[in-house]
Image: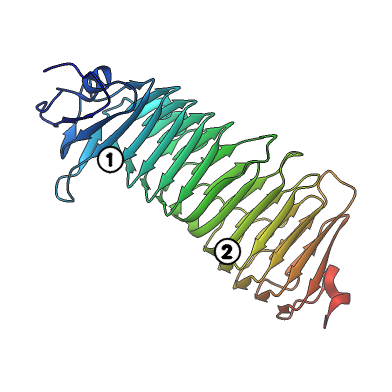
Amino acid sequence: MGSVAQAETVFVAADGSGDYATIADAVAALPDGGTIELGGGIFSGDGNRDVVLSAHYLISGTGSAEMPTVLDCDGHRAFVLQGGSLFGIGLTIQGGQAERGGAILAAGGSVELFLCRFEDNSADQEGGAIAADGGDLHLTSCEFVDNSASQCGASIVMRDGLVWMQSCSFVGPATGAADCIHIENDSPSGATSWLWDCSFTDMAGRAVDMVGAGSVTGRFTRCGGGAVRLVGTRLTPSQDVGNCEFIDCTGGPALEFHAFGSTMASVEDCLFVSSDPGSADLGVITLYGEGGSVTGCTFVDCAGTGGVVRGYSGDGPSGTGVIERCIIAGGGAEPVRCGAGYAFAVSCCDIVGGWTGCIAEQLGV
């Protein structure tokens, strides 16, 4: 076993053969920018868990569908980033457990993952699979299954950093009140976290809870704590949700916006079916703040005494929302409801049997 003099690719096998016996041995030998290829099979035990990354590494699973590359953490973390970066491809990480970040804990730096799977990881506090403080988190075509946390972020928690996520799927957990993804980013630059074309299925808590600028597209099915909550700040330029499906979302609003100051909340081209927030004070879409728009959306058999679209002025004296080109079929006698100081301008909508309450005078607009 020789030393590595320059950035290159090394191979580690699950049985300890290869260029180095463990992942940690390979990390210690490789310079900044090195690549570690992991063979198929189960990597476990000391040296294959709690691996500290303080430089930049590409770690790639080369296993097959029949024998994937599995990091079995057995009650430990897989990786701890200390200002470095991880580019992971084709890794399955399971059985991780920690106070924060059951599988990966990142203190700054960058985590970029492609075709990775996280299953049955947990945290005593937050970030059942991943907890990140600052830096960036990029996820593409990753799967999260039955990860859990006691407080928030059953799968992911990000604080003071940005998340870019595309074509990822989240299933469970079926118990517990923690949201699945929890993001807090009050960036003065107005940078936006993006969750594109992701799916959330069969979870007890809320799917996405995001503070700061955000844009969300995807599919939300059987989310027991509501689906998406976006909380703006004085530094948040916009919060956008578009091309989403919300099916059987209960226990809270399918969409909840808290928009402050100049923040503009918008919902476009979404489908809502059989969703019920379960409270007389909440709508399937609930808007707090000075404004917001709901455009091109369809609501079918959405129940609840709080209405389908509900607006509140929040901390301000008044607010005005816009509902246009929407179809609301079902939702009780008053599907659009206005809290004190809030009003909706409705145009080009088909609201079946529900031109009552605060929009009654707009019948026929």
> Which residue occupies the foreground of this view, 225 or 184?
184
Amino acid type of the residue tagged 1 in the rendering:
Leu
Up-down relation of residue 93 to residue 48 (above or below)? below
Q: Residues within 10 Å of mark 2 (few under 14, many from 20)?
A: many
Up-down relation of residue 213 to residue 4 (above or below)? below
Q: Residues within 10 Å of mark 1 (few under 14, many from 20)?
A: many
> Which residue occupies the foreground of this view, 288 or 296?
296
Determine the residue located farthest toward the front in the rendered image: 6
Which quadrant of the view contains residue 155? top left
Q: Disc 2 designates what residue?
A: 275
User: Any mark on residue 239, and which?
Assistant: none
Q: Disc 1 designates what residue?
A: 91
Up-down relation of residue 83 to residue 328 (above or below)? above
Place of residue 148 in the rendered image (x, y in percent of width and height, measured from the top left):
42, 38
Which quadrant of the view contains residue 182? top right
Amino acid type of the residue tagged 2 in the rendering:
Ser
Q: Which of disc 1 and disc 2 is earlier in sequence? A: 1
Relative to 100, 338 lies left or right: right
Determine the residue located farthest toward the bottom in the rendered image: 364
Relative to 73, 270 lies left or right: right
Question: Which type of secondary structure does the marked residue at label 1 adopt?
Answer: loop
**Could you tell me if residue 282 is visible in this image?**
no
Q: At x 66% / y 71%, what residue is drawn?
A: 296
